[in-house]
Amino acid sequence: MTEASATATAADTAPTAPDSDTSPQAIRGWLVDRVAYYLDVTPAEVDADAELAELGLDSVYALTLCGDVEDRFGLVVEPTMAWDHPTINAITAHLVDELPG
């Protein structure tokens, strides 16, 4: 990742208040954006049905994603979330089930 892209997305990584938009579409879109950021690709290049490991997401980023989910949605998730739910669509379904709504 370049310094410019890291600087441009620094706000994306800052902790925020839990997100009030917990629709499946919003969750999936946010997850696609996060994975694209980690992989330094465009969101259009991220297949929500592909396994995260196949996309190239390593264990460090998988754990980081768990922390980002906790910060974004105010939800405690297991550190194994990315292995238990190995695709973006699977994580989306899991979060929809876990979030109050």
Image: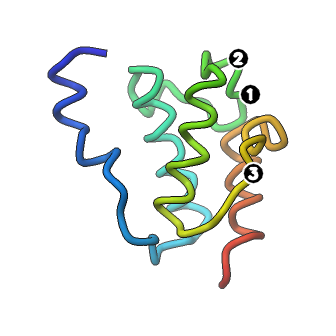
Q: Which residue is mark 2?
A: 54
Marks 3/2: CA distance?
Answer: 21 Å
Left or right of residue 28, residue 50 in this image = right
Instruction: Name the N-terminal-most of marks 3 and 1.
Output: 1
- In the displayed structure, 23 sits above or below 34; it is below
- Horizontal and vertical percent for residue 20? 46, 77
The secondary structure type at the circle numbered 3 is loop
**Which residue is the site of mark 3?**
78
Labels 1 & 2 near each other (Cβ < 8 A): yes
Q: Is tag 3's residue or tag 2's residue first in the polypeptide sequence?
A: 2
Q: Amino acid at mark 3?
A: Glu
Amino acid type for the residue under numbered disc 1: Glu
As helix, strand or loop, the secondary structure at mark 1 comes to loop
Measured in 3D between alpha carbons, the distance from the residue under mark 3 to the one under mark 1, in whole angstroms, is 18 Å
Label 1, label 2: how many angstroms apart (C-alpha)? 5 Å
Q: Amino acid at mark 2?
A: Glu
Kind of element beneath mark 2: helix
Furthest residue toward right: 84
Label ID, residue 10: none
For the point 71% across and 49% down, the residue is 91
Residue 69 x %, y %: 55, 54
- Could you classify mark 1 by the number of other residues whose Cα lies within 10 Å: few (under 14), some (14-19), or many (20 or more)? some
29 and 84: which one is in front? 84
Left or right of 3? Residue 29 is right
**Mark 1 highlights which residue?**
51
Q: How is the image coloured?
A: rainbow
Residue 2: name its quadrant.
top left
Identify the residue at image location x=63%, y=33%.
62
Q: Residue at x 57, y 52 (%)?
A: 28
